[in-house]
Amino acid sequence: MRVDLLVPDGPPAPLGPQPEPAPNAFQRLVDAAGAILEGADRAEAAFASRRGGLQEMVVERARADIALQIAASAAQRTAQSISTLLATQI
């Protein structure tokens, strides 16, 4: 009986915690939309406690609505692209 040793092609994987991967464009978009939503919430809370103006609250809420529409559109297009790729026959 003959046994051949397996030799790895590359260096072994490092042990321990791995560095966090850089955020992709979609993740940055979602993070930005979240920050805008937090700003809108702060503006609404300031208006409710009579420390902020109505105009500021309305503008911040409109910005948040637009950011959500952009994020939803990007998510829909990403899902549609992945679906198309998965349906492609090789």
Image (cartoon, rainbow, N blue to C red):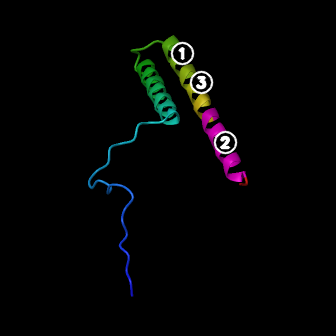
Q: Is residue 89 above or below residue 66?
A: below
Q: Which stretch appears magenta?
A: 73-88
The circle drawn on residue 59 is 1
Q: Quadrant of residue 46?
A: top left
Q: Whole-Å distance between the Cαs marked 1 and 2?
A: 33 Å
Provide residue 41's location: percent of width, then percent of height: 45, 26
> From the viewer's perspective, is the residue at label 2 or at label 3 nearer?
2
The mark nearer the N terminus, 2 or 3, is: 3
Provide residue 17's location: percent of width, then percent of height: 28, 50
Q: Amino acid at mark 1?
A: Val
User: In terms of secondary structure, where does tag 3 sit?
Assistant: helix
Q: Residue at the spot x=39%, y=88% of the render?
A: 1
Horizontal arrangement in the rendering, residue 12 relative to residue 29 (left or right): left
Q: Quadrant of residue 73?
A: top right
User: Considering depth in this image, is 51 or 68 the residue closer to the camera?
Assistant: 68
Considering the whole magenta stretch, tell me its main secondary structure. Answer: helix
Would you name the residue on which mark 2 appears?
A: 81
